[in-house]
Image (tube, grey):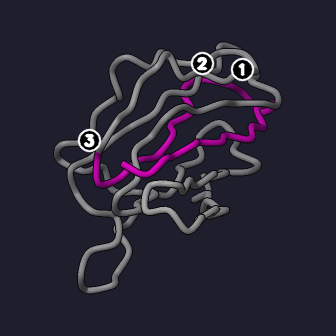
């Protein structure tokens, strides 16, 4: 099991609400833990998955009320489940390469994807799209 840290591409324009962030967790295997992502003022608009799912593999999104980057600057340990961590409702688990938005806007302090099932063939690229709230 490995911890997969995301990369973020921030696209900020001059207007206050004209910004978005594309976050990518690359090379996620079955059993890997994805690190939390937190960006104040941004809401999850949709997420997508590509790659090989392996046997019975699915991906869902988790949210938590705990800020992944608290004021102390220390990062929340991604291997420890948060007490209020829950599966994001309204955005179904994905089991094939696709992008899902369903006109949802989800606001939470922290987000991370979770791979369920899968096997030794599982290797996924998970992307999330956030917009300014």
Marks 3 and 2 sit apart, C-alpha to C-alpha, by 19 Å
- In this rendering, position of residue 81 left or right of residue 118: left
Who's the residue at 69% across and 45% down the image?
Answer: 28
Q: Quadrant of residue 51?
A: top right
Asked which secondary structure carries label 2, the reply is loop
Give whichever of 71, 57 is nearer the camera.
71
Give whichever of 128, 35 is nearer the camera.
128
Note whether 85 is above or below 49 in the view shown.
below
Identify residue for label 1.
98
Marks 1 and 2 sit apart, C-alpha to C-alpha, by 7 Å
Residue 92 is situated, as x and y percent measured from the top left of the image, at: 47, 15
Residue 119 is situated, as x and y percent measured from the top left of the image, at: 72, 27
Asked which secondary structure carries label 3, the reply is loop
- Residues marked 3 and 2 touching at CB (< 8 Å): no
Identify residue for label 3.
85
Residue 40 is situated, as x and y percent measured from the top left of the image, at: 34, 63
């Amino acid at each position: 099991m490995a911890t997969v840290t995301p990369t973020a591409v921030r696209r900020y324009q001059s207007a206050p609400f004209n910004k978005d962030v594309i976050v990518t967790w690359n090379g996620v295997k079955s059993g890997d833990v994805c690190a939390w992502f937190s960006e104040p003022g941004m809401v999850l608009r949709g997420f997508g998955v590509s790659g090989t799912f392996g046997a019975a593999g699915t991906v869902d999104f988790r949210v938590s009320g705990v800020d992944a980057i608290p004021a102390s600057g220390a990062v929340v340990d991604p291997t420890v489940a948060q007490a209020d961590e829950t599966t994001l409702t309204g955005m179904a688990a994905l089991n094939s390469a696709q992008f899902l938005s369903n006109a949802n806007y989800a606001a939470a302090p922290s987000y991370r994807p979770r791979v369920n099932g899968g096997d030794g063939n599982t290797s996924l690229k998970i992307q999330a799209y956030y917009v300014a709230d």
